[in-house]
Amino acid sequence: MSESINFRDVQKRTMQLSEFEDGLWDLLIGSIFMVLAFYPVTRELLGPTWNLALFLFLLAFVVVGHLVARHFISGPRMGYVQPRRTPQMRLLLVVMAVMVLLTLGLVLLTLFSPGRLSSGSEPSIPPLVRSYGVEWMVVFVMGAIFSVMGYRFGVARLYFYGWMLGLANLASVYMAHTAGWTFPVPAAIAAGIILVIGFTLLLRFLRNYPIRTQEA
Amino acid sequence: MAKTTGIAPDLLDLAEVDRVVHEPARLMILMVLYGVESADFTFLLNATELTWGNLSSHVTKLEEAEYVKVEKGFVGKKPRTMVQLTDTGRQAIDTYRQTMQGAMKRLG
């Protein structure tokens, strides 16, 4: 019996059920990175100030949409769980929040740097000589953050998301320098893959977990 | 433990195992609650795959043993029953776990 019951596994499964079964986190991550991917395109159309306003509005929209969907779609079907707030969990959340902000900052720096956006002009350093140090740092930071989350919550696809998004960012910057792409196609494809996974999980969730009408 | 001449003296502590916790359905409920602050009935239904009646009766037994605390409330017009593991319940699981792990180790 002790062989088949592992407390840590049960806790991970509880976390998976309460947080990751519905695909809404996937949709949130995919949406944020899709908005980031379109940032350079809309910037050329709107200018930096209005584009930033649009970016912040869309960011707020997807976050609020996520919370509303969790409340009205996921909650009645899966139920509500109040997570246990141990000191270790609080520390982990703070560390993750700081690292996520750091990563977003790095992504913004690499994707939207002025040199990268001037697609018509020659980059000051030849693309093959350029070391892409910051972009590689983004790859490893994102890979590490998502891997820690994937391990902590027992969600294997988060490992894939982290490395894919990091490498897609690197590929986008490389393509911008070598081919002059203003639209980061690899980043958009990565975000699109996450969105497709999210929608698939959401559909499966809606089919598997109908709204329960009886209450004790 | 007193010295005994029975067939399996090392396993005698199994006889003292908490039967409220030992029942599989209740053990499942307790284990789900062990990792969270509290959960509502709908989540416990999904996590344990018990029927509504079964879950309700087991939660009542756990509440009688003071292993869980049940709070009934409303969110808007909808009723919501939240179940939370008490300190006694947490201690009971830890004790049960140690007892079972010790017994399993001795079984080899």
Image (tube, coloured by chain):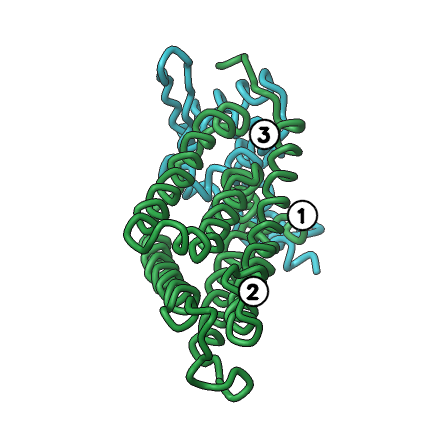
- The kind of secondary structure element at disc 1 is loop
Q: Residue at x 54, y 46 (%)?
A: A26
Q: Are marks 3 and 2 in contact (CB under 8 Å)?
A: no
- The kind of secondary structure element at disc 2 is helix
- The kind of secondary structure element at disc 3 is helix
Same chain for the residues under marks 3 and 2 in the image: no
Chain letter for the residue marked with disc 3 in the picture: B
Q: Earlier in the sequence, mark 1 or mark 2?
A: 1
- Which lettered chain is shown in cyan? B
Three-letter code, disc 2? Ala
Three-letter code, disc 1? Met
- Residue wearing tag 3: B46
Q: Position of residue A67 (x, y in %)?
A: 41, 34
- Residue wearing tag 1: A1
Q: Position of residue A151 (x, y in %)?
A: 54, 59
Along the line of sight, which residue is nearer the eye, A17 or A189?
A: A189
Q: Are marks 1 and 2 in contact (CB under 8 Å)?
A: no
Q: Residue at x 65, y 54 (%)?
A: B104
Same chain for the residues under marks 1 and 2 in the image: yes
- In this figure, what is the number of numbered marks? 3
Q: Residue at x 54, y 18 (%)?
A: B57
Residue A168 - label: 2
